[in-house]
Amino acid sequence: MRKAFKKFYSTASLLLCACIILSAFALTSCGIIEPTETEDANEIRETLEQKKVVRVKKGILSGRMISGENLELVDVPVASIPEGAIDSVEAIIGKYAAIDMVLGEYVFERMLTAEAPEKEEEPPLLYVIVNDMISNANGRDITEDLQSLINTHPGRTIYFNDGSYTISSTIHIPADKEKAVSLRLSNYAVIKAAEGWKSESAMVAVGANNEPASAEMAVNSIMGGCIDGAGFAQIGLLIENSVNTFISDLTFKGLKTSMQVKARADSVNAESITVMGGGQDDSVAIVNESSKSVFSTINIANVSTGIKNSGVANNFRNIFVKCNKASANSVGFLDSGSASIFELCTAEDFASGYVIEDGVKSVYESCNAVWTRADVTLQSAFVANGTFNSVLTGCTARFFDASSENAYIKVTTRGSGVVKAPIFDVTLCDDRSYGNVLAGTVIPIK
C-alpha cells in the first residue's frame, strides 16, 4: 500500500510541472507574456568592464616625495571608479604628497603638489645623551668633555645612561637663563669622584661659576642617579645664585656634606633624596642657608648631623635621619634660622634629636626623637640653647631606657616658646624641666 501511494505521488508531481510549462508556453505564444532581460545591457557591460587606476600601496606622509614603491595600478570595475581618480603612475612619481596618503586609497590631483612644501623646523631632541658624545669606558676622566658638552648645549637636558662617569674636579651648571641646562640620570647612573680629586668645591655646582648679578635665572633641575664622593670629594652638590632649583630622586654617598644650599639660592625644592654618609664626626648631610625652600621625603644615615638650617621660612617635611655612630655632639636637626616648619621628621639614635638655637622662632609638628640602642647614653629629644621661642606640638620621644640623662626638652632660658601635647614615657625621663614650658598635659606612652 505504501509503495503504491509513493508511486502515485511521484506521477502527480511530474504531471503538475508539465502543465505549468505548457501553460507558460501557450501564454507567450498568444502575446500575453513578453520575454524581458533581467538587467539592462549597458549596465551589464559597465559591470563587467575593467579600468586601471592608481592606488596607494605604501602610506606617504604629507610633504614627502612620492616614488614608485608607494603606488600600484589595479583593475577596478568602471562603475566603481570615483570621478577624478588618476590612472597613470608616471604622472604621480616625483610629485609630493599634499596630505597624508593612506594605504589602499585611490590617488586624486587634490592629494598632490608639484613643489616640496616648506619644511617645518624639527623640534629639538628631548635629551642630549652623554654616551652618544663622550666615552666613559674604563673609568676615564670625563671632566673636561662633560663640561664642554654642558657649555655647548644651553637650554637643554643632559641625560646620563646607566654607568659610572668619573670626574676629577667640579662640574659647573650655569643658572643664567641663556646658558642653563638640567641633568637627568638613569637609576643606575653614577657621577663619581676620581681618586685624584682636585677641587675643594662640590662635585656638581649650580650657579656658582661667576653668574652675573643681572642675569635672569632659569629653573635648573637635577634628577635621578647617584653622586658618589668615593671618600675623595667632600661636597656632593652646591646650589648658589639660582632660583627654583629642583632636586629629585637623587642618592648621595661617600661625602662629608651631601648637599649645600647657599643663601643666594632662592626657593629650592628637594625631594625623594637618599643620603648615605661617610660617617665622619663632623659630617652633615644637608646644609641649608636659603629661604623659602622645601625639603621633603629624605632618608639620611651615617652622619653626625642630619639637617643644619640657618635659613628663614623653610619647610622640612617627612625627613628621617639616623646616626650609626652616636657621639656627644651628634644632632639630628640643628636649627639656627627662623620661621621654619618641621613636620613629621624623625631623628634616630642621636645624642640630641633637635637643637634649637638662641631665640629661633620655628614650629615643630608631629616630630619624633627615637633611640634604639643602649650605647647612646645622652638622650635629649629637644635642646633649646639660649632663649626658647619655638612651638612644639604633638612631638614624640621614645627613650631606649631610663636614665638621668634623658630629657624631653632642655631649656636654658624661657622665652615665648611652648610645648603642646608632648608624647613620651615620663617614667624614663628624670628631667622635669619640660614642665616650665608645658601647655596642657603630657600624653604618656609605653
Image (cartoon, grey):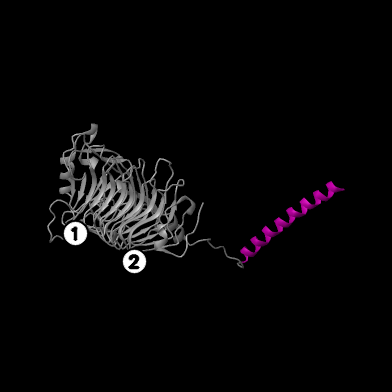
* Other-residue count near label 1 (Cα within 10 Å), few / some / many at <14 / 14–19 / ≥20: many
Q: Nearer the viewer, residue 63 or 317?
A: 317
Which residue is at 21% across, 46% downward?
204
Location of residue 359 (image quadrant) = bottom left
* Other-residue count near label 2 (Cα within 10 Å), few / some / many at <14 / 14–19 / ≥20: few
Q: Position of residue 4 (x, y in %)?
A: 84, 48
Location of residue 356 (image quadrant) = bottom left
Instruction: Please state the extent of the stretch shown in magenta in the rendering.
Output: 1-30
Task: Report how far apart the C-alphas of labels 2 and 1 lie in the structure.
Answer: 39 Å
Q: Nearer the viewer, residue 21 or 347?
A: 347
Relative to 218, 395 lies left or right: right
Which residue is at 36% across, 41% downward?
324
Look at the numbered disc 2 and give the secondary structure of its residue.
loop
Location of residue 396 (image quadrant) = bottom left
Sooner in the amino-acid sequence: mark 2 or mark 1: 1
Q: Single out the residue that lies furthest toward the top.
A: 138
- Identify the disc placed on residue 257: none
Residue placed under numbered mark 1 in the picture: 217
Please tell me whether mark 2 or mark 1 is closer to you in this view: 2
Relative to 219, 422 lies left or right: right
Look at the numbered disc 1 and give the secondary structure of its residue.
loop
Q: Position of residue 250 (x, y in %)?
A: 31, 47
- Name the amino acid, label 2: Ser
